[in-house]
Image (tube, grey):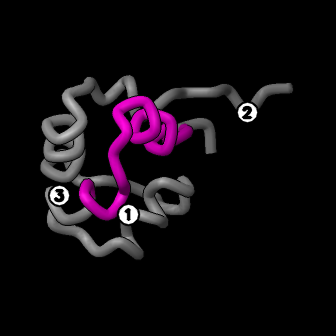
Amino acid sequence: MPIKVCLDQVLARRNMTSKALAEHVGITTANMSLLKQGKVKGIRFATLESICDFLECQPGDILIYESDET
């Protein structure tokens, strides 16, 4: 999939835990783990908005596009 999730890097730069983020967003830590690993097919805009609010960042800080072409 050409969309990559960079949530780990953003959390590390802000010295925050995924557990605290999951609690703020209102999702389980298991779902947060799947999101961080990029194993989800989609994300609700409300969830993305809540993540950006908590991390004080933009969606482009979390999601990047990388072409599958080699």
Which amino acid type is marked by label 2? Asp
Q: Name the image quarter holding residue 32.
A: bottom left
Q: Position of residue 23 (x, y in %)?
A: 19, 65
Q: In terms of sequence position, does the residue under pointer 1 or pointer 3 come before the other?
A: 3
Q: Real-space Cα distance between discs 2 and 3?
A: 30 Å
Q: Residue at x 36, y 53 (%)?
A: 17
Residue 32's label in the rendered image is 1
Q: Horizontally, is 28 left or right of 30 in the view? A: left
Residue depicted at x 50% and y 35%: 9
Please, what secondary structure does the residue beneath circle 3 have?
A: helix
Q: Whole-percent x and y of residue 6?
A: 50, 37
Q: Closer to us: mark 2 or mark 3?
A: 3
For the residue pair 16 and 53, the one nearer the viewer reads as 16
Q: Is residue 27 above or below residue 37?
A: below
| Residue shown at the point (43%, 30%) measured from the top left | 13
Q: Quadrant of the C terminus?
A: top right
Q: Residue 46 at x, y = what percent?
A: 13, 49
Sequence-earlier tag: 2 or 3 = 3
The answer to which of 2 and 51 lies nearer the viewer is: 51
Reading the image, the residue beneath label 2 is 68
- Magenta highlight range: 4-21
Give the Cα separation between the discs numbered 1 and 3. 9 Å
Magenta stretch contains residue 36: no
Instruction: Name the amino acid type tagged 1.
Output: Met
C-beta proximity under 8 Å, tags 1 and 3: yes
Could you classify mark 1 by the number of other residues whose Cα lies within 10 Å: few (under 14), some (14-19), or many (20 or more)?
A: many
Circle 3 is placed at which residue position?
Answer: 25
Circle 2 or circle 1, nearest the eye: 1
Left or right of residue 21, residue 67 in this image: right
